[in-house]
Amino acid sequence: MTTQVTDERIITLPAATVRPIVTGEDWLRRSLLLLVTGFLLVGVLLPLVPLVVRSLSDQNGQFVGLENYVRYFTSPGLASSFVNSMTVATLTTLLAVGLAFGYAWSITRTCMPAKGFFRAVALLPLFVPPLAIAIGLVYLFGNKGLVTTGFFGFFEQTLGAPLAFNINLYGMNGIILGELLYCFPQAFLILTVAAALADARLYEASMALNASALRTFWTVTLPGMRYGLISAIFVCFTLAFTDFGVPKVVGGNFNVLATDIYKQVIGQQNFVMGATISIVLLAPTVIAFVIDRIAQRRQVAVLTARSVPLRPRPHRVIDTLALLYCALIAAAILIVVGTVVYASLVDVWPYKLNLTLRHFDFRNVGGGGWGAYINSLWMSFYTAVFGVIIIFTGAYIIEKSRTWPGLRHFAYFLSMVSVALPGLVIGLAYIFFFNPKSWTILGVAVPNPFAFLYGTMAILVLSNIVHFYTVSFMTGTTALKQIDGEFESVSASLRVPFYRTFARVTLPLSLPAVAEIAMYLFVNAMVTVSAVIFLYSPQIKLASVAIVNMDDAGDTAAAAAMSVLIIAACLVVRMVYTGIVHQLNRRTQAWRLP
Amino acid sequence: MKQFIAMLIAALLLVGCTAVQPGSTAQTGAADSEAAATSGEITVYTALEDDQISNYLPLFNEQYPDIKVNIVRDSTGIITARLLAEKDNPQADVVWGLAATSLLVADQQGMLEPYAPAGLDRIRPEFRDPAEPPHWVGIDTWFSAFCVNTVELEAKGLPIPTSWADLIKPEYKGLIAMPNPASSGTGFLSVSAILQMMGEEEGWAYLDKLHENMAVYTHSGSKPCRMAGAGEVAIGISFDYRAIKQRDAGEPILPVFPAEGSGWEIEANALVKKETISPAAKTFLDWAIGEDIMRLYAASFPITAAVTDVPIPEGYPEDPVAQLVANDFVTMASERENILAQWAERYDGKSEPR
């Protein structure tokens, strides 16, 4: 009911505000849109061109049409890999989005205690390098894991009951568990932004109409969070479908499509097939993108200019249940992270379990030690600062301006595509695109204007911004969507320049989301491996790559120790973030308080 | 031994002939006569282990304090992929200690500059590219070995396997890990050794039985040994250096060299072809096969490219060369795709955890 009314308003109002004369302000908007689109072209689309070209060529660079695709689709084991990938992605999405929805709802819509704590714990898995998560899972659920052996028979001795469970880690169970830890924080991040803003008037109306809690949930809560839900599903499905980090470590014999790229590129140096599979993996994202667009067309502003912010009311039963629910999930996360910390302290797992700090001395292991750690901090800092400026500007100009719809849709599409690019693919595509001194286009050599970036800090930062663009962009878009377009319309009719509306209304309202994006970019840049492992230069070694090298060399404990340092850095940033948001909320979100 | 050398030489000659690119041998003659450069800055791509590098490199820094060496180290697969992907504008000046099969691929793409490092005459002929001057020069070999966790086997009351034949006994069901040959060179090494030793038919029948006993296939060549060291599996099919190293680190690992023989591979150096080749790169390549460093290699590798007076490291067979199976690199390289396709067909589909 409300939906239709607002829908009309959204559709008709902009038409009314469009003036036939193109003003300087419009040009400013257009240049911003061009800048953002240009960034996405260079960061996302153009680097894919050499990949597409390779997928249509044979090993010697001769054009062969679709031959590689035919070969891939007729390769043995592909059908089972496809079914496996779909199963993993679907189950992960259901679990991650379902659990994150309840968690986000509990934190934003109930009066349970310790919300700040639970919010922090939900994001904790993002702070843990993927390899460390795998170490944690193996130490817990592997054949010698704490859970599998019942704490090495400790329970059996003390409690008389074995209390040991073997979940068969190596295979589908391990992959889903790993992907769940990887996707849950991302889904939580999107959903919590979506759930944070709600119009109390709708709930009052619902109460006045004597609707049951369930009915209110279906007719008010869910529709209000629809965009966030669809986005979360899109992100989780794509991440679980294209990630190869988790299957690589705990996948065992359970083959998925994403590891096919690894086998071709790293195992057999077959870039042609690697490129072909990368392009094939993009297909689900494009389909999901179309679905997302359709759903998004019906999206309405949840927070209108007349909205009254929802203040959750205490309710003993619901608050207790929410607390229990969050505590369970938080405990699961903390156990995995705690195991990583434990792994960094144990002398020789699982045979000498005494604790030591010797693994934090990185002098005797490879990878660059503390220097690499400092490099990673700088890289993550740059990624956060430049990333948040570019991504939030992008989200704003795509969401809030009405200029050049074709280009806006194109930029939106590019913003969504990046999530479907596994880091390995970004890394390779960047070498192909940025490394050559000149490109050959239709037989003509054209100097590469971006070649100077190769081997610098800038390309690492660029690859990170692109790699983590989509979730940040969605967080920004979700926050912006919830701010009524009327703010813009009113400002426009009062002849207030859009940038002043942006600075005075939109940006202050969105500051929590801006801080969230910066933090998300920072922590991801700290832990990511797959893209930067191809791009780091000998002068700029990175902590996350060092972890892989140390683990590769058998120094699992040192790898865990470096992971602990990364987690610590992320926690510090998280605390700074909380401090900032607290200040911001006092200053800019006061309107939400009664 | 004789047989493997003959086969290897024949094999490498073939590869050498097909791989030489027209014009690639043109400019080396003049460069050789220059005196070795003692200053400059070079980038070195390597797949040697981190602890080996920190053992070897100080020797170079001592001798050439004015040459700055930037090391990029990663696993064989990553370094090879990076090297090949950068083909249009190579970043590396020198490749140091990378699998010869990887260098063959780079050579086929015309990425290597032929160079005869000083002291080449001391290198055993089977350890270098037969072309003159060679496109690559070997430094050591590594070969397949089992990492056997003695604590786990003892707890289960099982004997220590000593041969490939032992691994397919039913009592080891679910206790073995090996690298997937499609993801790891070490994995392919073992599979190709089995197929060459037993012949195609018998080899695949053996692999079928091995598959029945396999707990997990990994994507990295060192992972099975690390899993064995952590007790995740009892037996990891991996390679020699890894097994010895983990044993020395205090893990309950017994390195076992299978009685039938091991698959093997050469680690080699090469000069990367690029617009301006730094003279310091050649200095490095000269040093990298010199007498001093060869003795250091010999302390951790039982078979080195030049004969040294360093005794065979502890834990290796007395005659390590006898441990190596006859390896036809060329046939294996050309058959690789077929073997992997067949492997995938046989074992990838049945992926349910057992």
Image (cartoon, coloured by chain):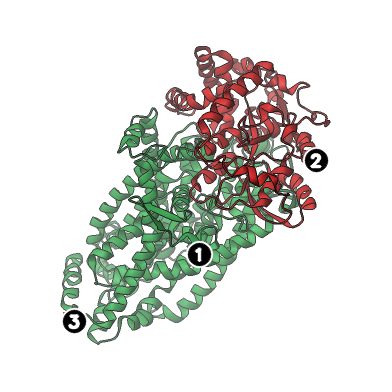
**Which of B93 and A83 lies nearest the eye of the viewer?**
B93
Question: Hey, what amino acid is under mark 2?
Answer: Asp
Residue assigned mark 2 = B292
Count how many numbered circles sit on residues in the image. Answer: 3
Q: Position of residue B169 (x, y in %)?
A: 60, 15
Chain identifier matching the red colour in the rendered picture: B
Left or right side of A281 for B48: right
Q: Position of residue A263 (x, y in %)?
A: 48, 36
Task: Look at discs 1 and 2 and give the one toward the viewer.
Answer: 2
Residue A206 vertical placement versus B152 (above, below): below
| Quarter of the view holding residue B13 | top right
Residue A432 vertical placement versus B245 (above, below): below
Residue A556 — which label?
none
Residue shown at the point (60%, 56%) measured from the top left = A542
Chain A rendered in what hue?
green
| Quarter of the view holding residue A47 | bottom left
Same chain for mark 1 and mark 2? The answer is no
Question: Hey, what amino acid is under mark 1?
Answer: Thr
Can see residue A395?
yes
Q: Earlier in the sequence, mark 3 or mark 1?
A: 3
Residue assigned mark 3 = A21
Left or right side of A513 for B103: right
Left or right side of B301 for A406: left
Residue shown at the point (65%, 22%) measured from the top left = B262
Same chain for mark 3 and mark 1? The answer is yes
> Does the CB distance between marks 1 and 2 fall below 8 Å?
no
| Quarter of the view holding residue B53 | top right
Task: Determine the CA span between mark 3 and mark 2.
Answer: 79 Å
Classify mark 3: residues with Cα within 10 Å, few (<14), some (14-19) or many (20+): few
Identify the subunit bearing mark 3.
A
Classify mark 1: residues with Cα within 10 Å, few (<14), some (14-19) or many (20+): many
Residue assigned mark 1 = A383
